[in-house]
Amino acid sequence: MAGSSIPTVDELVIVTVKKIFPYGAFCQMEEYNREAFLHVSEVSSGWVKNIRNFLKEGQRVVVRVYRIVPEKNMIDVSLKRVSDADSKRKLEGFKRDKRVAKLLEVAQSKMKTKPKMAIPEVTLKMATEFGDAFSGFEAAAADGEGALTKIGITEDWASVITAIAKDNIKKQVRRISGIITLQCTSEDGINTVKSLLAIDGAEVAYLGAPNYLIAVEGDDFKKCEKKMKMIVESVTKAAEKKSCSVKFERKE
């Protein structure tokens, strides 16, 4: 948890709605010990006649920080600037972080001697190396304690974490997809499109010319996003050389 620190502009945060007024809602930030304000104009991209049709007190939602005024101790957040995909990823990450905290507490309770590292240090090392601490547990479950000791986690922690991971962690498969619109007007356009969409490590499905579905899978959302970005950039670059037009849209 972030404690008393403050978020950054454009950061996605989880809040619990505390008080609702016609002009907006005051929210408590789950990851920060601070209050944020959600103005009625930032609730929905459409017209909001009654804010209570969109929010309820006690509701937990993902919002985006769009303004911070430190001298007034004011943090303004937006709900309408968060996509469904952003919300899903943020909530999943939050749940994973909470599960990690519990698993590390269990790991520490199983140690017969005082641990050589504190829980926050273990968490930071795994998050730094694997993108998030839960992925460190997944790595330990798949590759053993060596996956942890090589990044500087002491053997006492590595052995207990690995044992817990093997009993509790099942590696999940993440999948992201998007629709690529590819148009080639040359005489050999069909074969050109086929060659451009001969992509290693991705699923390509025909949706009806000129639209094609591209999907990638992996054990981490960030890695999937990076892989998808590389694929789209590669196809776009190759298509431009063949005078083809390309448009890509992520599928939520």
Image (spheres, rainbow, N blue to C red):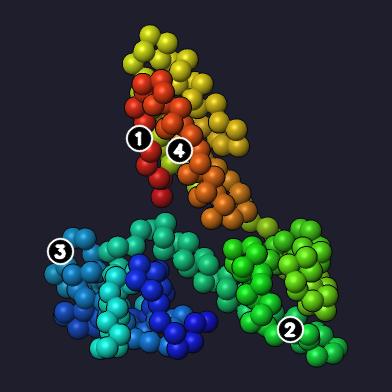
The percent position of residue 54, horizontal first and vertical second, equals: 26, 70
The kind of residue on which mark 3 rests is Trp
Residue 43 falls left or right of residue 176: left
Q: Is residue 61 above or below residue 116?
A: above
Mark 3: few/some/many CA within 10 Å (<14, 14-19, 20+): few
Check disc 4 and report the residue beneath it: 233
> Which of the labelled discs sits on residue 47, or is there none?
3
The kind of residue on which mark 1 rests is Lys
Check disc 2 and report the residue beneath it: 117
Marked residue nearer the N-terminal end (2 or 4): 2
Marked residue nearer the N-terminal end (1 or 2): 2
How far apart marks 3 and 1 lie (CA) works out to 30 Å
Label 2 element class = loop
The reply to whether callout 3 and callout 4 are in contact (CB within 8 Å) is no
Check disc 1 and report the residue beneath it: 247
Question: In front: mark 3 or mark 2?
Answer: 2
The reply to whether callout 3 and callout 2 are in contact (CB within 8 Å) is no
Q: Along the line of sight, which residue is nearer the eye, 26 or 121?
A: 121
The reply to whether callout 4 and callout 1 are in contact (CB within 8 Å) is no
